Image (cartoon, rainbow, N blue to C red):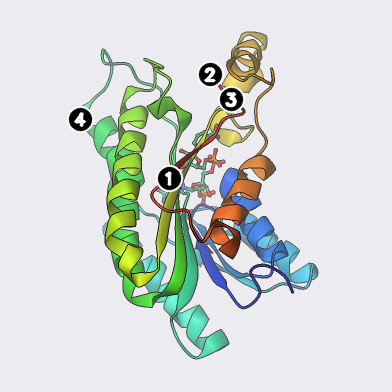
Amino acid sequence: MKKLEGKIALVTGASRGIGRAIALRLAQEGAMVAVHYASNAELADVVVQQIRRSGGDAFAVGADLLEQDGIHQLFSGMDAALTVRTGGDQFDILVNNAGRGQYRTIEDITSESLDEVLDLHVKAPILIIQQALPRLREGGSIINLSSAVTRIALPNVLGYSVSKGAVNTFTHVLAQHLGARGIRVNALLPGIVETDMNADTLGTAEGREFAAGLSAFGRWGQPEEIAAMAAFLASPDSRWVTGQLLDASGGSRL
Ligand SMILES: NC(=O)c1ccc[n+]([C@@H]2O[C@H](COP(=O)([O-])OP(=O)(O)OC[C@H]3O[C@@H](n4cnc5c(N)ncnc54)[C@H](OP(=O)(O)O)[C@@H]3O)[C@@H](O)[C@H]2O)c1
């Protein structure tokens, strides 16, 4: 039997990059997957079709998490699709992955740019977890995408780093709070991964040298490598793991 057979997962930001790889991997392990996207409906549909072609089940849910009613839209979409498939709104795995890069130092940060990263990386996942709680079954797993920049000081991503620091904090606090319900809460802290977020960095020889030089392995990461760790955190193999910040950076700046 597959490790996630009978489980249902919601992966935010699953149209591209790390979220897409996580959605595909969780489906491969047997989970039904809600593939969330903000504006790339066509890309989300490609992920859904890929999962269905491999014999799995998936559906897409669109919601811009920076919009006022984004969270409401996300859960109305989830509830409607799940009711058709299962007759209820319950699910098991929540991956808070949706995010955006932001290059700003203390000199050029603005009130608006800070609002954007904090709203998307802190406020949205907290409110998503709040809405997920009545719907999450016992034994559920919440996985939050943080970043190795919470450990490695990169002055040109100040607001982004601060927002991911908050992800580490709510992961820690909520693991304590939700342990009584048998719900685990962990975070993954990737280093540089080859996705659209790093297209500019990996688009120059200088950027590639910087990215490869961070890791003990002398290269940058691939989305599938983060997805493998998410699959572990989603599965019963990690049933004794909660409140942990798992480095997923290929040993960056050890
Ligand atoms: N790549 C890295 O090196 C790296 C390193 C550390 C941590 N991370 C974290 O890992 C996560 C995924 O990063 P990635 O590199 O895979 O990103 P990506 O390839 O740029 O994909 C971003 C995803 O987030 C969604 N998204 C963006 N803005 C949104 C909004 N306002 N509302 C809802 N969804 C939104 C996008 O949806 P659309 O396609 O519809 O726009 C897309 O699915 C992020 O939380 C990121 O901070 C990434």
Residue under circle 2?
Answer: 254
> Circles 1 and 3: CB distance less than 8 Å?
no
Report the residue that reaches farthest toward the bottom. 87
- Is residue 72 visible in the rendered image? The answer is no
| Residue sitting at x 36%, y 30% | 160
Residue under circle 3?
Answer: 251
N-terminal-most mark, 1 or 2? 1
| Residue 179 in the image, given as x and y percentages of width and height | 34, 63
Spatial CA distance of label 1 from label 2 is 18 Å
Spatial CA distance of label 1 from label 4 is 31 Å
Instruction: For mark 1, give the secondary structure.
Output: loop
Q: Is residue 19 above or below residue 141?
A: above
Pointer 3 local density, CA inside 10 Å: few below 14, some 14–19, many at least 20: some
Q: Amino acid at mark 4?
A: Ser
Instruction: For mark 2, give the secondary structure.
Output: loop
Spatial CA distance of label 1 from label 3 is 17 Å
Label tally: 4
Report the residue that reaches farthest toward the top. 206
Tag in front: 3 or 4: 3
Instruction: For mark 4, give the secondary structure.
Output: helix
Q: Amino acid at mark 1?
A: Gln
| Residue sitting at x 54%, y 33% | 197
Q: Amino acid at mark 2?
A: Leu
Q: Is residue 126 above or below residue 9?
A: above
> Circles 2 and 3: CB distance less than 8 Å?
yes
Residue under circle 4?
Answer: 111
Residue under circle 1?
Answer: 244
Is residue 225 found left or right of 14 in the rendered image? right
Is residue 16 found left or right of 128 in the rendered image? right
Tag in front: 1 or 4: 1
The quadrant holding residue 58 is bottom right
